[in-house]
Amino acid sequence: MEKKLKTVLLVDDDAATNFLHSIILKNLKCTETIDTARNGKEALDYLHENNPPDLILLDINMPGMDGWMFLDELDKLPEIKSKTKVIVMITSSVNPQDRLKALERGTTGFMSKPLTNEKAREMLSEHFPDMF
């Protein structure tokens, strides 16, 4: 791998999912740092306290602030949103409307869970073509 991402933020309330996705990203050696947030509120707090990550993998259904609410709040923070390069919605939702809504809401991609090596490599190649 030529180039690494500096940071990936995993936003999902399921610890096992975050763990699995972390392992896949670590195995691909595609990022220096992987951080996690358990809901949209934690993700917003993270964005206020840290440099924006190169990639956010965002779940839809989470307690408190879900993925849609996170996107709504991010819209109110143009200085942070403009620095957030890639947001991919990754969800167990099978509702085809969610894919359309995610893309209309400004995410750069939509994937079904779980992340696999193949899906991760494909997503990274699409959004960061100089990585592979």
Image: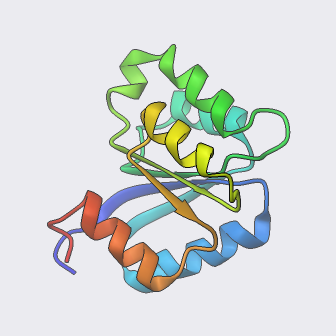
Coordinates of residue 71 in the picture (x, y in percent)? 56, 30
Which residue sits at x=33%, y=42%?
Answer: 85
Q: At 54% from the left edge and 48% from the top edge, which residue is drawn?
A: 99
Image quarter (top left, top right, bottom left or bottom right) of the N terminus: bottom left
Examine the rendered structure and indicate whether residue 45 appears above or below residue 17: above
**Residue 30 visible from this viewpoint:** no
Report the side of 59 relative to 121 (left or right): right
Location of the C terminus by quadrant is bottom left
Return the residue nearer the eye: 131 or 6. Answer: 131
Farthest-out residue, right: 63
In the current view of this chain or complex, which residue is farthest to the top? 76
| Residue 65 quadrant | top right
Q: How is the image coloured?
A: rainbow
x and y percentages locating residue 38 in the rendered image: 74, 49
**Residue shown at 39% from the left, 66% from the top:** 32
Of all residues, the one furthest to the front in this rendering is: 96
Q: Position of residue 127 (x, y in %)?
A: 28, 57
Q: Is residue 13 left or right of residue 45?
A: right
Q: Quick one: 94 or 51, which is closer to the camera?
A: 94
| Spot occupied by residue 94 in the image (x, y as percentages of width and height) | 68, 59
The reply to whether residue 112 is visible in this rendering is yes
Q: Is residue 65 above or below residue 18?
A: above
In the image, 44: left or right of 33? right
Q: Which image quadrant for residue 124? A: bottom left
Number of numbered markers: 0
